[in-house]
Amino acid sequence: MCDLPGFRIIARIRSDFGEKFGIPRQSGMVPRLTSEVVFEPEFGSCNALRGLDGFSHIWLLWYFSENAGAKWSPTVRPPRLGGNARMGVFATRSPFRPNPIGLSCVRLDRVDTSVPNRPVLTVSGADLMDGTPILDIKPYLPFTDSRPDASCGFAQEPPVPSLEVTFSREAASALPGETLDALADVLCEDPRPAYHCDPDRVYKMNFAGFDVGFKVSGHILHVISAIRKTS
């Protein structure tokens, strides 16, 4: 097992996102998304999970493995500000940070300990790419982790889905029902960089084992193709 300097990978996530493009910008934005946290054998003791099934939500601390070694900047362009205004990196959740560590709150749907030394947590609402290393798991405690009166700077209001998603007949018929619904929930949040507005551009996205192609014109996102990937 390959450990990070000073850290140990305790698990990896299995998700529908085969690449960074299209991943929700925050956890919990797409509750319909289901993922699995699969433990490494060394950390797969059922005793380590004792009592976890009593919590409805958990925190995942994880490593931005795709950004390892990437250059970081003191200021970044948050999508919430249209991708033009700059803010300090520590005032944002940009993945490009001095230490590429992510933090996500997800719903814990199931704890499966049926396979010895290889327990699996089924979670929903995760914003992680498939294979992302998990560094730690902690229970979510509403009495201390929830702050309803907190101020949120430039992100005070939750984002409102901005796009209506439609599917070509071919794309709709290629996608299983649950996959189609989850994909629609992801795409309505508009995965494009905030400064992209070319209606003729075809965007490609790897989702749930499909190569998905779509265009955006005005407030309509139209999925034109969904082709199952071959190994």
Image (spheres, helix red, strand yellow):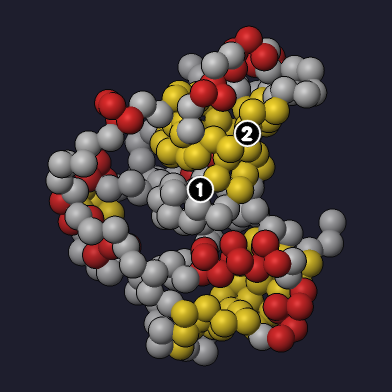
Q: Residues within 10 Å of mark 1 (few under 14, many from 20)?
A: many
Q: Looking at the image, is 78 positioned above or below residue 37?
A: below
Q: Looking at the image, is 211 positioned above or below residue 70?
A: below
Q: Residue at x 74, y 66 (%)?
A: 176
* Residue 4 visible: no
Which numbered disc covers residue 125?
Answer: 1
Q: Amino acid at mark 2?
A: Arg
* Outermost residue toward the top in this view: 47
Q: Residue at x 28, y 27 (%)?
A: 143
- Seen in the image, is 175 located left or right of residue 15? right
User: In the rendered view of the protein, which quadrant contains the N terminus?
Assistant: top right
Do the CB atoms of the residues marked 2 and 1 lie less than 8 Å apart?
no
- Seen in the image, is 9 located left or right of residue 147? right
Residue 21 on image: x %, y %: 53, 61
Q: Amino acid at mark 1?
A: Gly
* Residue 30 visible: yes
Q: Looking at the image, is 218 positioned above or below residue 194?
A: below
| Front position among marks 2 and 1 | 2
Find residue 66 and report its image quarter: top right
Residue 201 on image: x %, y %: 53, 84
Q: Mark 2 sits on what residue?
A: 110
- Seen in the image, is 7 located left or right of residue 177? left
Residue toward you, 104 or 173: 173
Residue toward you, 17 or 52: 52
Q: Looking at the image, is 91 positioned above or below residue 3?
A: below
Q: Residue at x 69, y 58 (%)?
A: 208
Find residue 76 and report its image quarter: bottom left
Q: CA distance from mark 2 to mark 1?
A: 14 Å
